[in-house]
Amino acid sequence: MTFQQDHLLGIEPLAPTEITALLDLADSYAELNRAEHKHGDALRGLTQVNMFFENSTRTQASFELAGKRLGADVMNMAMQASSIKKGETLIDTAMTINAMHPDLLVVRHPHSGAVDLLAQKVNCAVLNAGDGRHEHPTQALLDALTIRRAKGRLHRLSIAICGDVAHSRVARSNLILLGKMENRLRLVGPPTLIPGQFAEFGCEVYEDMEEGLRDVDVVMMLRLQKERMDGGFIPSEREYYHRYGLDAEKLSFAKPDAIVMHPGPMNRGVEIDGTLADDINRSVIQDQVEMGVAVRMAAMDLLARNLKTRRAAA
Ligand code: NCD
């Protein structure tokens, strides 16, 4: 089989052929999700546990729906109320869950690397739903599927990722994925929010939106992640919106058919104009949410197939 992974911890270990295989399968799940009967049976009999140590609206809902549509028993652990608060370590929590024989474990954690660590301790497939500033692989995959469906291809596109790159696992995973698929990548934002290490991804860096957006096919906006900032990154939100907030005027520098993306949650009037975000002729933000369910179905389906093969061979 083309998809060789035991876990989905990041985009980093994926080959371009694995990305394409996953997106192809997700395309077929997107069709299923638009049908009246939305059920498949790829995960029938399996148990999926969602452990979110950080707040989430769409990612958690999307993983839950994806598992249910494919027939898994889905359990959401309320991590805010869990024994973590009583001082249990991440590993102890993982071992406890592991003893309940889950097949798929979906984890979001505020610390970069925490999900990788956990994957070494359990004997099921682990999916990273976002770890610190490190990776958010299903977000990058759903963004890729949205771009591929809107543009008809996922290579040789000019893509600008704008705003708070420094704190964004979404930006990191997207840079890795879109780079692997051979696109031209630009980062646009104030220098305080685009640290030097991003040069290693081989992208052009712009401080000015007009220059950075010129003739791009895709404009990907990022949320200003205030909860990860310890002050001093921007002069004021008003000033930030003036220079970096995407509105119709700044978008006019991009190609006439450029699409607008945002992973959500959005700060309207901070990084993006609300009217533009809702403009279905330019914004694909709702498509991103729709593709999120399909991509998570595909990811869990492929990992479950590999898990079953591994267990049968053991
Ligand atoms: C992102 C996240 O949590 O990393 N949201 C999401 O998963 N859709 C981006 C963000 O929080 O800004």
Image (cartoon, rainbow, N blue to C red):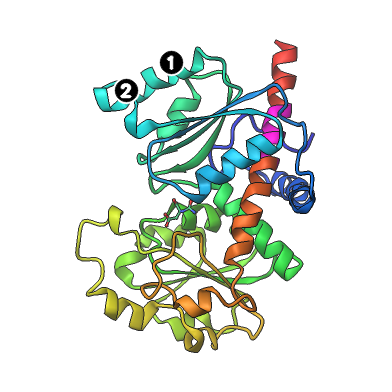
- What crowding class fits label 2: few (fewer than 14 Cα within 10 Å), some (14-19), or many (20 or more)? some
Residue segment shown in magenta: 298-305
Three-letter residue code for mark 2: Ser
Lateral position of residue 117 relative to residue 18, left or right? left
Above or below residue 245? Residue 19 is: above
Q: Residue at x 43, y 21 (%)?
A: 94
Callouts 1 and 2 close, C-beta under 8 Å? yes
Three-letter residue code for mark 1: Thr
Residue 203 counted in the magenta span: no
Gap between marks 1 and 2, in whole Å? 11 Å
- What crowding class fits label 1: few (fewer than 14 Cα within 10 Å), some (14-19), or many (20 or more)? few
Q: Residue at x 61, y 51 (%)?
A: 292
Please tell me which residue lies in front, 77 or 242: 77
Q: Earlier in the sequence, mark 1 or mark 2?
A: 2
x, y percent for residue 160: 53, 71
x, y percent for residue 151: 72, 70
> Which residue in the structure is indicated by mark 2?
83
> Which residue in the structure is indicated by mark 1?
96
x, y percent for residue 233: 25, 66
Q: Count how many numbered circles sit on residues in the image.
A: 2
Nearest to the eye among marks 1 and 2: give it: 2
Query: Which secondary structure, mark 2?
Result: helix
Above or below residue 17? Residue 236 is: below
